[in-house]
Amino acid sequence: MKQKIKNAMILLKACWRVLMLDKELLVFPILSIIVLGLLAGSFLWPLYESGALISFLENMSDEAEGEGNSEYWMMAISFVAYFVSFFVMIFFNAALIACVKIRFAGGDPVLMDGFRASMARLPQITAWAFVSALVGFILNQLKNKEGESPGFIVGLLGAGWAIAVYFVVPVLVSEKVGPIDAVKRSVSIIKKTWGEALVAEVGLGILYGIATFVGFAFFMAGLIFFGEVTESPEIALSIWTVGAIYVLLAALIFSTLGSVLKSALYVYAVEGKIPQQFDEDMFKHAFKNKD
């Protein structure tokens, strides 16, 4: 296990080197957040201005215990929100992965390379966004049902689904297949990269958890200055602002590192090539095919 963790850290360091070569990769997750925010604002603000949003929420409150039409409207709106969110995230993630693959092949990608790749796979991305939204929506509805046992089962189903579709986006970028075939390909690749590959992903999650804990420390420090003892709200606000920026930046960096790692695993498992910036001996020890 100690060696597995060591291999995982080596992998993550290699992913960091890729990010340092192409810092513009961070633009894709940033754009994803901006686009989602703009879409949400452009939809909700007119409804709020017209009063329709307030009226709808009031109707929801009045019929919370009934079987009114508002429940079905809310379900429909929730699904649309799921679909739009998944589409935007998958579109920009596909663009990021396309650029990473160009770097692995020895090229020097630019942002437009990623956007062209995503546009070329727009039908596949749209179909996969629909499937992802549908599965996510169904799992969320089941999770909201009463009872602890169903929640535990739904959690297992969600975890299994997340593992099964781990390589779907790289498959969509590299192979012109539909969502069902993409899931099948993803499962077959998972079988080839089982072991340190998942340990590396867990290692990435642990490092992100540590970074998040540091962000929580900013929040606690702000509370100390905001308290009655020091009564320094200006300092507290400054600390919270720095903490929020830090947490957002950490989320962007670790999200990008995750996509780089996923791309490296895909290239090695499918193409049998060692991505540039990665050590050949390390890769051969870390990923042992189980054919």
Image (spheres, helix red, strand yellow):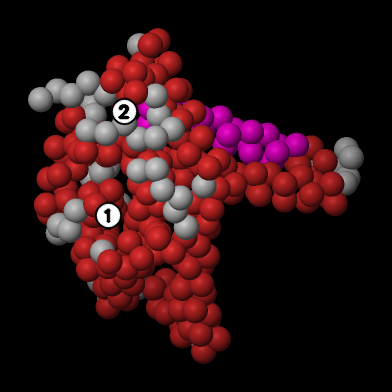
Residue 27 lies in the magenta-colored region:
no
Q: Earlier in the sequence, mark 1 or mark 2?
A: 1
Q: Main secondary structure of the magenta part?
A: helix
Residue 267 position, x and y percent, is 27, 39
Pick the front one: 39 or 288: 288
Question: Image point 17% across, 30% down: which residue?
Answer: 191
Mark 1: amino acid = Val
Q: Is residue 192 left or right of residue 68?
A: left
Q: Quadrant of the C terminus?
A: top left
- Determine contact: label 1, label 2, CB under 8 Å: no
Q: From where the camera sits, is residue 129 visible?
A: yes
Mark 2: amino acid = Ala
Magenta region:
195-221
247 up-or-down from 58: above or below: above
83 up-or-down from 171: above or below: below
Pick the front one: 68 or 35: 35
